[in-house]
Image: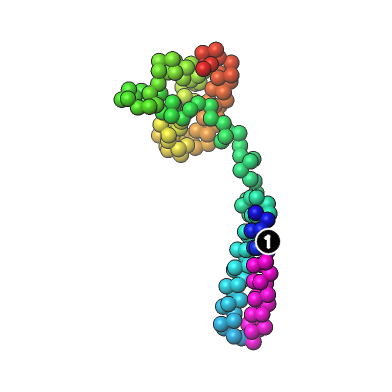
């Protein structure tokens, strides 16, 4: 990695030298030198971007790295495939078919939700609709869907950690 970074820094020095050489010709009014200078300037910007990425380990310009992703985006309270199988109630030999015990566990986890929370949670996690699509179907705002799903996730998380039926 250090060799790669060193190589890019050497390339940057060479581009800086070429840029300065074109400056004198561009000041005279040489159109070709001006175009070359502009191209070299763009190349310098790209190399600077790569060097910053290599030095920091992050994509340049991002305010936050992936390691600061919100908890609700990292945490999966239930296996999405199980939730989808629960909603579809399929028995067509799919590998995601649920046993009666798994179905009972999901019912128990969802039993603590209000009707509206359950609708939003099932549509977004079971039917894989986006918050926007769910909001249009239920004729509520997208932010309401987000709030209801967040509440549902909190209730399910609490239920999962405190329920004996959800063990295993």
- Location of residue 28 in the rendering, given as x and y in whole percent from the top left corner: 64, 87
Residue at 57% x, 73% y: name it.
39
Q: Secondary structure at mark 1?
A: helix
Query: Outermost residue, bottom direction?
Result: 28
Query: Outermost residue, top direction?
Result: 164
Check if residue 152 falls in the magenta segment: no
- Above or below: residue 1 compared with residue 19: above
- Above or below: residue 143 compared with residue 10: above
- Location of residue 148 in the rendering, given as x and y in whole percent from the top left corner: 52, 29
Find disc 1 in the rendering and name its residue.
Answer: 6
Residue at 58% x, 77% y: name it.
36
- Location of residue 53 in the rendering, given as x and y in whole percent from the top left corner: 64, 54
Residue at 39% x, 26% y: name it.
96
- Above or below: residue 138 compared with residue 4: above
Check if residue 19 falls in the magenta segment: yes
Specify start and end residues of the magenta stretch as a single range.
10-28
Relative side of 135 to 162, left or right: left
- Camera-nearest residue between 12 and 140: 12
- Camera-nearest residue between 13 and 142: 13
């Amino acid at each position: 990695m250090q060799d790669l970074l060193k190589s890019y820094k050497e390339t940057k020095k060479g581009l800086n030298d070429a840029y300065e050489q074109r400056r004198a010709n561009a000041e005279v009014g040489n159109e070709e030198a001006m175009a070359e200078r502009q191209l070299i300037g763009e190349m310098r910007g790209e190399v600077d971007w790569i060097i910053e990425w290599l030095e920091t380990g992050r994509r340049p310009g991002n305010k936050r790295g992936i390691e600061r992703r919100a908890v609700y985006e990292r945490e999966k309270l239930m296996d999405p495939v199980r939730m989808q199988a629960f909603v579809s109630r399929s028995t067509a030999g799919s590998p995601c078919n649920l046993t009666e015990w798994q179905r009972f566990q999901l019912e128990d986890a969802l039993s603590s939700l209000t009707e509206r929370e359950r609708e939003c949670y099932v549509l977004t996690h079971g039917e894989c609709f986006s918050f926007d699509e769910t909001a249009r179907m239920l004729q509520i705002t997208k932010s309401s869907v987000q709030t209801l799903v967040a509440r549902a996730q909190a209730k399910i998380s609490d239920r999962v950690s405190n329920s004996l039926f959800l063990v295993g």
